[in-house]
Amino acid sequence: QLQLVESGGGLVQPGGSLRLSCAASGFAFTLDYYTVVWFRQAPGKEREGVSCISQSGSATTYADSVKGRFTISRDNAKNTVILEMNNLKPEDTAIYYCAVDGGQSPTTCTIIPHQWRYTIRGQGTQVSVSS
């Protein structure tokens, strides 16, 4: 069974940092072959695409709301995509989940909101930012 498992969420104070991981598991499921996108959803709010990274790792995209604070990267040896989140704000509070898109160019990434594109997605990890 192909799975994505997120980890690293938690409760932090404003200005704090968290490091989220998106790990792939399952027979021959290699994240190298996919664009990986992080989404988040807060209660009562629409789902928001946060960041993506291309198959090659050479291209990244960020939502304006997190630009300059979040960094996405690949750890191919661990078959994992990392989302480093710094200077967290209360409005970053949400469930964060990752998803894979097999339909994009290897060297570009676009945060496409249509969830039907994402054949595999994780269950999410809770991020709470509060004093």
Image: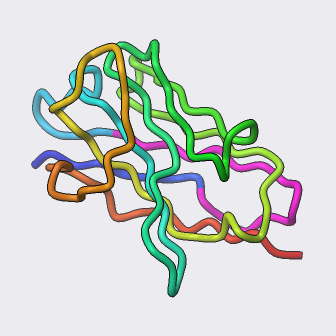
Q: Residue at x 81, y 75 (%)?
A: 130
Scheme by which the image is coloured: rainbow
**Residue 76 covered by magenta stretch:** no
Image coords of residue 111 (percent x, y): 38, 43
**Residue 19 covered by magenta stretch:** yes
Foreground pick, 3 / 103: 103
Image coords of residue 2 (percent x, y): 15, 45
Q: Quadrant of the C terminus?
A: bottom right
Q: Main secondary structure of the magenta part?
A: strand
Q: Above or below — where is 106 with respect to 96? A: above
Q: What range of the chain is rendered magenta?
A: 9-23
Q: Residue at x 67, y 64 (%)?
A: 92
Residue at far bottom of view: 44
Q: Residue at x 50, y 42 (%)?
A: 51
Q: Residue at x 46, y 12 (%)?
A: 58
Image coords of residue 34 (percent x, y): 25, 29
For this view, does 116 lie left or right of residue 85? left
For this view, does 49 lie left or right of residue 101? right
Image coords of residue 5 (percent x, y): 36, 51
